[in-house]
Amino acid sequence: MAALTRLLRSAATSGSTARISLSTLASEPKTGFPAGLAARLAPALTRKERDERNVQWVFLGCPGVGKGTYASRLSQLLGVPHIATGDLVREELASTGPLSQKLVDIVNQGKLVSDEIIVELLTKRLSKGEEKGESGFILDGFPRTVRQAEILEGVMDIDLVVNLKLREDVLVEKCLGRRICSECGKNFNLARINVEGQNGQPGMYMPPLLPPSGCMTKLITRADDTEEVVKERLRIYNDMSLPVEEFYRRQGRLLEFDLPGGIPESWPKLLQVLSLEEHHDDKQLAAA
């Protein structure tokens, strides 16, 4: 974890030289980092053997697909931290830090946050985890670009990349139904998805994730959860995600999982494809 923290900090602060070097990575197959960058970061490129650490997984998927929901449940099940870059951005938005106003403008316009800002926030989070002795992780929302994937690949052995998939019309409906309790900060969803099967395709039902009575009157909608912003966010994500998916597909690390429905239906099947059937007794607990 220390190695990744040092590398991310270096990437965030090295300025235009690092940005120019990293931009050539996609056209330099099998070479890893450009020689100059690798030489500067060599002392940080240390790795732990698989039996000395917990799992190191990445969750990919469109905004609103449920990465946070399933990554959070798996992190509890496996005893590893769930690190969501979306949460890091929202924490920064709620602060009075120097990045706050810049992030407000970016998020409200439905744009994606730059690599530099994401790296800075992730570096800060990893540093805190290192101080607490954390081992392993499930990353949610990072890497988002091939550049970020190359940075991560340079210092960490990613064991598995889970790509959650869901049809776009359902994604939009889910995003528009999202709510946050202004008091406790927990996420809920008021959308009731009920899509009939047609043309040989199965139907899909996702019940709403309703809040307890104490939170019901305190629900707020995220500023970026409007139909126009949601569709723009999905368009940008789809344009950027294919190269990242292909990056991990070529390495044989990509697991594509089509969500068949809501949590009660999808969670047991996800555990099955992840070969985590031994956690059968935890299925209902984690899906609650």
Image (cartoon, rainbow, N blue to C red):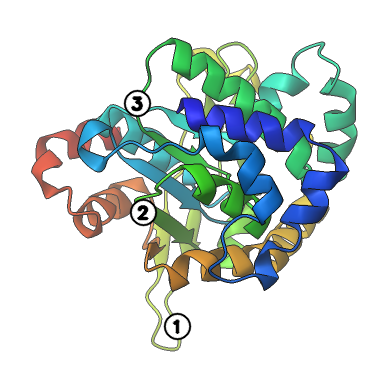
Determine which residue is flagged by label 3: 135
Q: CA distance from mark 2 to mark 1?
A: 33 Å
Pinpoint residue 256: horizontal percent, then vertical percent.
Answer: 40, 66
Pinpoint residue 276: horizontal percent, then vertical percent.
Answer: 17, 48
Give the residue at x 44% y 31%. 82
Q: Along the horizontal axis of the image, is 183 left or right of 103?
A: left
Where, quadrant-wise, is the N terminus in this rendering? top left
Pinpoint residue 61: horizontal percent, then vertical percent.
Answer: 54, 56
Secondary element at image label 1: loop
Q: Mark 3: few, some, or many residues within 10 Å (few <14, many ≥20)?
A: some
Q: CA distance from mark 2 to mark 3?
A: 16 Å
Sequence-first tag of 2 and 1: 2
Q: In the rendered image, which quarter is residue 241 located in?
A: bottom right
Q: Mark 2: few, some, or many residues within 10 Å (few <14, many ≥20)?
A: some
Give the residue at x 38% y 20%. 134
Is residue 179 visible to us here?
Answer: no
Q: In the rendering, which numbered label is found on residue 198?
A: 1
Q: What kind of residue is marked 3?
A: Ser
Q: CA distance from mark 1 to mark 3?
A: 45 Å
Sequence-first tag of 2 and 3: 3
Secondary element at image label 2: strand
- Disc nearest the viewer among 1 and 3: 3
The residue closer to the viewer here, 3 or 264, is 3
Q: What kind of residue is marked 1?
A: Gln
Q: Along the horizontal axis of the image, is 126 left or right of 219?
A: left
Determine which residue is flagged by label 2: 160
Pinpoint residue 176: horizontal percent, then vertical percent.
Answer: 67, 46
Give the residue at x 34% y 32%. 75
